[in-house]
């Protein structure tokens, strides 16, 4: 059985898990992207670290350090252009 990173439904703050996926976040307006990543995505990775998940152990001290929504949006656009299909680039990014 495969465990989904983002299950169906909403998180404890009422944000739909579907909105935390890269495929959604990358299309958000800069301020909405910033809010979603800062308030929902980053905390979820730190929580996984506390739960002992392998990926989470590396992310338990991760911090979100973008102070400008437009800078975040530009970074997301750049990352989204990196070809990842059939390549092992995601771990490096």
Image: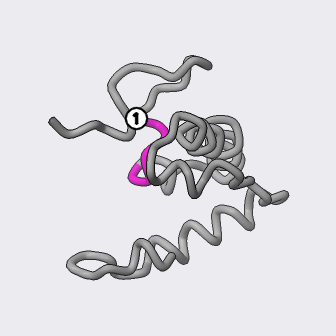
Farthest residue toward the front? 52
Query: Is residue 64 or residue 14 the one in the foreground?
Result: 64
Is residue 81 placed above or below 66 in the rendered structure?
below
How did the renderer colour the structure?
Answer: one colour
Looking at the rendered structure, the secondary structure element under dot 1 is helix
In the image, residue 34 lies at what x, y percent?
A: 69, 48
In the image, residue 25 lies at what x, y percent?
A: 51, 49
Query: Is residue 46 or residue 9 the one in the foreground?
Result: 46
Q: Is 10 covered by the magenta stretch?
A: no
In the image, residue 62 lies at what x, y percent?
A: 69, 55
Quadrant position of residue 9:
top left
Quadrant position of residue 58:
bottom right
Is residue 10 placed above or below 74 in the rendered structure?
above
Count of number-bearing discs: 1
Kindly identify the residue that appears in the image at 63 percent across and 71 percent down.
75
Kindly identify the residue that appears in the image at 70 percent across and 44 percent down.
38
Whether residue 35 sits left or right of residue 56 in the image: it is right
Is residue 15 placed above or below 46 in the rendered structure?
above
Per the picture, the main secondary structure of the magenta-coloured stretch is helix
Mark 1 lies on residue: 18
Whether residue 53 sits left or right of residue 71 in the image: it is left
Query: Is residue 47 or residue 79 the one in the foreground?
Result: 47
Q: Which quarter of the figure is the N terminus placed in?
A: top left
Kindly identify the residue that appears in the image at 51 percent across and 74 percent down.
79
Packing grade of label 1 (10 A; few <14, some 14-19, many >=20) is: some
Quadrant position of residue 84:
bottom left
First to last magenta residue range: 18-23
């Amino acid at each position: 059985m495969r465990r989904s990173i983002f299950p169906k439904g909403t998180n404890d703050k009422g944000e739909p898990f579907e909105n935390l996926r890269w495929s959604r976040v990358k299309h958000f307006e800069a301020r909405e992207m910033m809010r979603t990543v800062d308030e929902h995505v980053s905390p979820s990775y730190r929580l996984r670290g506390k739960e002992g998940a392998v990926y989470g152990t590396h992310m338990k001290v991760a911090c979100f350090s973008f102070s400008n929504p437009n800078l975040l949006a530009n970074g997301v656009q750049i990352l989204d252009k990196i070809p990842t299909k059939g390549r092992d680039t995601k771990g490096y990014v």
